[in-house]
């Protein structure tokens, strides 16, 4: 008679606890997650290297025989923004095929010879977007007859394309400035109807009194008409010479003139935000290229945002 086979040691075998099983599952899950992230990181890098259309060099479609207004052509050549280009045309600084043209809407194509102040210009092949943190004592212009320092001196190594500033910051104002050769975007960001927001950090020569604070919010009348801000706040409640101002007006020296109208001297004026762009990772006097995401955001932003 055969004996039944028994596992004499079975009763000593320990079964895994629920906690141990859960821990093994968690470790396996972490491993899968890590492998998945590595896979997609590799894919993103491969895709980036293939496309390589970063925002510092975005190709423009060939215009061929497509007609466009003369001022738009000048803007697309990276000379200046479209409104400034219209002024150049009206001032008689532009010739088309050696003929003087003073109408900004005059239609031209890429095959026409266009000269600005006697120099032939060409449509830009690559669109460039550069964000500069402007220091004081640099003027916002592409050329200065007095040979003063300009913002272009700060971005000499950024691009071989001819770019221009979008809007202006006066010589004693520091902060964010966008430079590009994209005339359409420059037109959009500077046109008053789009109400592009800017935020400034203001340092006054004395504390801003409550009555004047309320007056600025209510709105004041300057020599060129009413002026108001969108948001006004003390940056530091212990130091009321430090003021934060959000405004969408693009009028010349508007922030300085608002406070000067009420008897304050602006000791320091720094633009800390422009059209949603900030100074993060851009030290004073330095610059960086916009990312593709930032460029898309600027081109599709909504009014007042």
Image: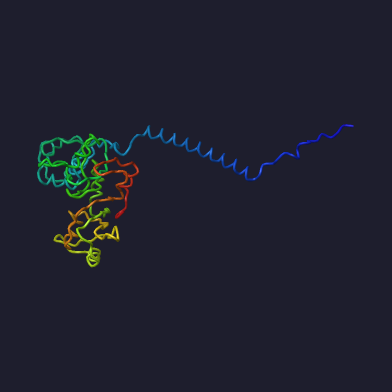
Give the vertical position of 114 relative to 192 (above or below).
above
Q: How is the image coloured?
A: rainbow
Residue found 84% across the figure and 35% down from its top: 4
Give the vertical position of 239 relative to 165 (above or below).
below
Percent of width and height locating residue 71: 18, 44
Percent of width and height locating residue 156: 21, 36
Foreground of the two, 249 or 303: 249
Quadrant location, the N terminus = top right
Picture quadrant of residue 2: top right
Q: Could you tell me if residue 107 is visible in this image? A: no
Residue found 18% across the figure and 48% down from its top: 83
Is 110 placed left or right of 27 in the picture?
left
Numbered marks: total: 0
Foreground of the two, 32 or 61: 32
Task: Please identify the residue farthest to the right as the structure is shown.
Answer: 1
Picture quadrant of residue 242: bottom left
Residue found 33% across the figure and 47% down from its top: 297
Foreground of the two, 282 or 107: 282
């Amino acid at each position: 008679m055969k004996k039944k086979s028994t596992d004499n040691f079975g009763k000593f075998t320990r079964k895994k606890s629920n906690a141990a099983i859960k821990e093994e599952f968690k470790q396996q899950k972490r491993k899968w997650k890590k492998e998945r992230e590595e896979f997609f990181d590799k894919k993103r890098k491969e895709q980036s290297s293939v496309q390589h259309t970063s925002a510092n060099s975005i190709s423009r479609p060939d215009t061929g025989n497509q007609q466009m207004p003369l001022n738009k052509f000048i803007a697309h050549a990276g000379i200046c923004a479209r409104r400034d280009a219209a002024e150049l045309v009206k001032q008689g600084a532009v010739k088309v095929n050696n003929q003087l043209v003073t109408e900004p809407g005059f239609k031209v194509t890429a095959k026409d010879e266009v000269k600005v102040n006697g120099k032939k210009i060409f449509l830009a092949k690559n669109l460039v977007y550069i964000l500069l943190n402007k220091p004081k004592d640099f003027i916002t212009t592409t050329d200065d007859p007095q040979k003063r320092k300009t913002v272009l001196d700060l971005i000499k190594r950024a691009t071989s394309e001819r770019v221009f500033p979008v809007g202006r910051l006066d010589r004693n104002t520091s902060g964010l400035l966008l430079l590009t050769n994209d005339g359409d975007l420059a037109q959009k960001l500077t046109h008053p109807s789009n109400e592009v927001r800017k935020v400034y950090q203001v340092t006054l020569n004395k504390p801003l009194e409550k009555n004047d604070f309320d007056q600025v919010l209510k709105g004041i009348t300057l020599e060129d008409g009413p002026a108001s801000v969108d948001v006004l706040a003390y940056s530091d409640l212990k130091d009321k010479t430090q003021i934060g101002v959000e405004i969408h007006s693009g009028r010349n020296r508007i922030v300085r003139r608002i406070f000067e109208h009420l008897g304050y001297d602006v000791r320091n004026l720094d633009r800390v935000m422009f059209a949603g762009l900030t100074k993060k990772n851009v030290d004073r006097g330095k610059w960086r290229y916009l990312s593709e995401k930032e460029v898309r955001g600027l081109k599709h932003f909504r009014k007042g945002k």
